[in-house]
Image (cartoon, rainbow, N blue to C red):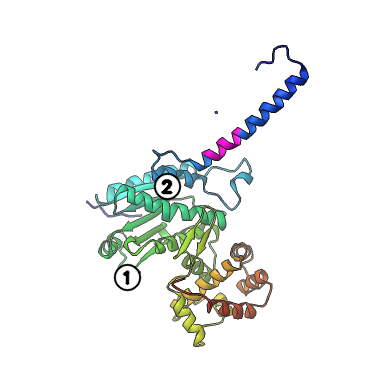
Amino acid sequence: MRICSRDEEHTGGQSVQSYVRRVIKYSIIAFVCGGCVAALCLWWVPSGATLGQVAAEHSRAAPGAVAAASQPTTAKAYPSDELSKACHRHAAALRGRLDDTFTVVTFPPFVVAGQATPKAVERLAAGSVVRPAGAMWARYFRHKPDQPITVLLFSGNKNYRDWAECLFGDRDVAHFGYYRPGDRTLVMNIDTGSGTLVHELTHALIAYDFPDVATWFNEGLASLHEQCRVLNDDIVGLTNWRLPALQAAIRDGKIRSLRDLVTKRDFYGPLRGLNYAQGRYFVMYMQKKRLLAKFYRYLRAHHNGADADVRAVEHVFGKPIAQVDADFRVWVATLKFPSR
């Protein structure tokens, strides 16, 4: 992409029985102690380690769709040496073209540049990029990026808009931030918070795992992550500001059917705002029912053909989509934002 220039005994004469007993005894002791040491290694982080070092280790060990312990020994390490080198080359290019208000850090596959101190940029990258990505790879996505993904974090609306135009010629930009799929770049006004960052990160990652994903699910899952709790192997959406408009539309009879939402390819049409809300909370409903990951995997494997999305909904829920829709609406009415 084009970036503007700115500024780890011997037994002697003992009997065989005694020898065997001692071997068994010390084997048990060694096993127990070894387990304790391993547990401590998993828990302890050296006090001198930086956030960047910890985050980099998390990135390299981020679980995939299969837990690391169950992956075949032939599985390739991620990220590859080639990808890491590509990220470092890209970071060097960014440092040479952005001005001295930026800090550039690399956590392959991510190259993060932000208008903040090194510690602040490391913290943002670790907490709002690396950790959510690891959770999404653990929960949903089998395939990971094989090219660098750039994350640009601008301080304030003016810097955000000025740099978006300078770097990409983008003038009509969203208030919070946006994703450029062509050059795999997230462009953010980070002063508005990190919710949009995780939203756009979802788009960047799902593209490698399910490039043909329907827009309603792509935006629904990404919107779910606007307000979320990130765990080591899961990412859980919480209620957010989109709820009141959806509840009002349901009360007033102005919401479209769930069948329409998942079959008509008009997500960005006149009902765009309501589509985001309906998509987000239907995905959250599947999360509540513990069906979301199952639905994603099924849809990914069976997304071809007419009404594929409807069939996926009915397969996972085990009931007609009209009944799923009715149950969903009743559930939405029970939600509160802000939650208490």
- Disc 1 crowd rating (10 Å Cα; few below 14, some 14-19, many 20+) is few
Which of the marked residues, 2 or 1, is nearer the chain's N terminus? 2
Q: Amino acid at mark 1?
A: Asp
Residue that extends furthest to the top in the rendered view of this protein: 13
Residue 86: image location, x then y, percent: 42, 45
Q: Quadrant of residue 313?
A: bottom right
The answer, for residue 151, to whether it is visible in the render is: yes
Q: Amino acid at mark 2?
A: Phe
Which of the labelled discs sits on residue 172, or is there none? Answer: 1
**Which secondary structure, mark 2?**
strand
Image quarter (top left, top right, bottom left or bottom right) of the N terminus: bottom left
Q: Residue at x 66, y 15 (%)?
A: 10
Mark 2 in CB contact with mark 1 (< 8 angstroms): no
Q: Main secondary structure of the magenta part?
A: helix
Magenta-span inclusion, residue 105: no
Residue 153: image location, x then y, percent: 33, 57
The answer, for residue 267, to whether it is visible in the render is: no
Residue that extends furthest to the left in the rendered view of this protein: 7
- Whether 12 is drawn above or below 29: the answer is above
**Which secondary structure, mark 1?**
loop
Magenta-span inclusion, residue 38: yes
Residue tagged 2:
107
- Which of these two is toward me, 236 or 179? 236
Look at the image and give the residue range highlighted in magenta: 33-40
